[in-house]
Amino acid sequence: VADFQTEYLQILGELRPDQLDAAELAAAAARSIDAGIMPETVARLRLILVDDVQDATQSTVSLLRALAARGVRIIAFGDPDVAVTSFRGGEADLVSRFGHAVGVEDMVTLRLSRSHRQSPNLLALTGAITSRIGTAATVGHRNPAPATMSDGAEDSDRVVTAVAATPARLWSALAWHLRRRHLLHGLAWNTMAIVVRSGAQVPQIARALALSDVPTRTVSGGIPLRDEVAVRGILTMIDVGIGRTALTAALATELLVGPFGGLDRLSLRRLRLALRTEELAGGGNRPADVLLVEALEAPGRLATIDHRAARAAAKVAETLADVSSASSRGASVEELLWLVWERSSRAGVWRDQALGSGVLAAEANRSLDGILALFTAAKRFVEREPGSPASAFLSAVLDAEVAEDTLSPQAAEDSVLVTTPVGVLGRECDTVIVAGLQDGAWPNLRLRGSLLSPELLVRAATGTVDGPIDARKAVLADELRMFALAVSRASREVILAAVANDDESASVFFSLAPEGSEQLPVQTQPPLTLRGLVGRIRRTLTSAGGSDASAAANLAYLAEQNIPGAHPREWHGLRESSTTGPLYLEGEPVPVSPSKLGAFEESPMDWFIESVSGTRSSTAMGIGTIVHWAMETASDPDVEAVWSAIESRWGELVFESPWLAEQQLRAARKLAVAVSEYLGDFVREKKSLVAAEGRFTLDVDRAKLNGSIDRVELSPDGGIVIVDLKTGKPETSQAVIDEYPQLAAYQLAYSSGALDDVLEGVPDHHAGGAKLVYVREGVRGKSYREGMQAPLTPEQLEQFRERIRQASIGMALGIYPGSRDIDPYGMGDAAVRALHRIRAVTSD
């Protein structure tokens, strides 16, 4: 410990020779007072009032001792049962020996026996907690009598428990309760507080409450500046601009989709596609990642792409170039920050958003707070170290894992306080929610300070070492004190909140709640928000056919107040249909795709939506396209040859993260093995490839069947087998394969002569059926799986012709039914399909 202290002081002296921390400043002040060197304001002091003396550290005690020695009267207030600063040298038993600590041996001690804050129920909970804390040389203050009894109001003197199966449900219920207290009981937001054990939980809870329109504020240090999204965005821009960090594809993506890039993921995909298209048109074959980095390193590179995404990316490239130029001229980090900030034009956007309400406003406020803190830190850095380069500031901020202290005053806004127990010292609240009461989290009985044992350091320094200490018992006492502090701040209501399910359970602290404590309902309640009110009234009106005059009047009033969604002009679905005519006129050909025929038969509505809007591209679809191409162009069944073909186009794919790219690369390797094995078996069985990607057109009455066949194969016996490659999950039901419309369409094309051009040069052949080849999963020792559809008989072919006729009639009709219910969290495009099932005028 001594060696560590020596090294620590040496390093601190080198890094900050002219700076003192709070403890050093207080100690220096005490020495100055002892020496009689003090300003007039201190010399005139006659009385000092000290609150929460149980949390005073030795630096504070030394300052008070110096003042007491000069005859200054000291009146101190404290409660050892709510001491919560042992982690920084506080001692719970300081209250009992305060007189000796400050050099006043005859100090008078008064014990207050009445509580002017809490009524009987709340006092019972506080007493149940403090009675389990070991004594700190005094216990006469415990179990005070209430100065006033409960006023009998519905919402007073209550201990409530709230337990839900998920955090989302819990915080939804708690937010609803807070809004109810505010709206129906008239409580100001700033009379309510939420206390959690760990500061890491504070930002998460603030965001959860913002989702329910509950305004919050925090007084804890929060998260490091580097972890604020807006701050990281602007610092990354400067980091890359000055050349401290080389620009990579990952950083380019972070810059473009970050708060100062202006792109979303879809716009970024379009930009990458445009860059790739230009590259291929110019005869190159570099991957999109390389092209994206090149575009940001050369501002003029994007001038040939006329798209909003390209213009936004060009602005980022210009900003990077300007930062580089300014840095080379010796600009300070503060000047570089202003350069990026002014070019971004985010100030006005975030200001307008912050003046609103809801999640967007909360996010904008956080962004502005983070930027303000960053500029303050940069200004302080420039003032303290005027000759240091911008890279030194970036290193300090980006490498910091602890949030900076701030001397900036906190706005006393009307909002719910979210903090740790230390944050409610000296406060009184009407309602206190003690959250995060999970088993193993609060109380957390893990032994702390095993390296330096700070509690022993303090006792050694003050000479109060009095025998061995039960470390685990001391930790439990600290946990109980934090809990007691949180609970004792409430004057009318305490809510104990936790999540309980198969993986988590509530804390043992719940057992301290008085018997018969109420339980907070956690089931979904009607939202106490303007948005929720508008939704309920709209549902009432649409359900009642507009005959509810009271609801209509209320909605009209909300519309006059410009509440979003209240005025009918903002409702969807009120306009007349643009047309009720058929999709295809009488006699007009109806294009039918073999691969989409099954989708139409399953759900005409979803078929139409996909036909009009197209399906969303995905990484899986991109991998499937590349595997199809590799099989189509393969001239050698060797697995390395197939893999080389796949790998040559792998750079065209975009992945959300490196680990996902690695996972998909391994999966693609398995697909390559399966394709190679299939091609090897194909050669060994002496089959011949007639055509790959053979296209055909076939007219069936109005239907125009257009398709592309992956492989047309010739068996040694002259049978023509049509093959469709699948990279998805295999179909294992033979009954489904027998009726598979895509294969049947290919067989119909063969029997009708639509493949004659493809089969030119094949003298003798007959129908050999069609099959699906799955390369994702194998069967019976092989890495691939086949699903064979036997050659269709003339009767089966005619039946399938009729299926196509009926499908073409349905496709042309313009009326597309579909099942109403669908799981919006299902696979593929389930979310899009669910979106189109929402009623025209909704309750949302």
Image: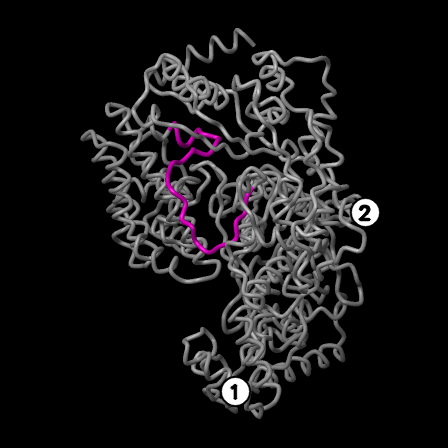
Instruction: Give the overall secondary structure of the magenta segment.
Output: loop
> Front-most of 542 and 768?
542
Element marked by disc 2: loop
Mark 2: which amino acid? Arg
Q: Give how far across and how far down residue 660 sits, in percent.
A: 57, 43
> Quick check: 817 above or below 741?
below
x 42%, y 10%: residue: 10
Q: Identify the residue at horizontal 71%, vertical 67% (top origin).
A: 767
Q: Amino acid at mark 1?
A: Ala
Q: Which residues are magenta?
A: 395-419
Residue 361 shows in this picture: yes
Name the residue at the left extreme: 329
Dot 1 falls on a residue whose secondary structure is: helix
Which of these two is toward me, 177 or 208? Answer: 177
> Is residue 437 left or right of 425 when viewed as pictured?
right
Q: Is residue 401 magenta?
A: yes
First reached walking from the N terminus: tag 1 or tag 2 = 1
Would you call the spot at circle 1 few (<14 residues within 10 Å), some (14-19), or many (20 or more)? Answer: some
Label 1 – label 2 distance at C-alpha:
68 Å
Q: Is residue 675 above or below residue 398?
A: below
How far across and how far down the image is residue 526, in percent?
Answer: 62, 70
Q: Residue at x 60, y 27 (%)?
A: 95
Q: Tell me if I can see residue 162 in this picture.
A: no
Q: Pointer 1: what residue?
A: 552
Front in this rendered view, residue 159 or 418 = 159
Which mark is drawn over residue 780? 2
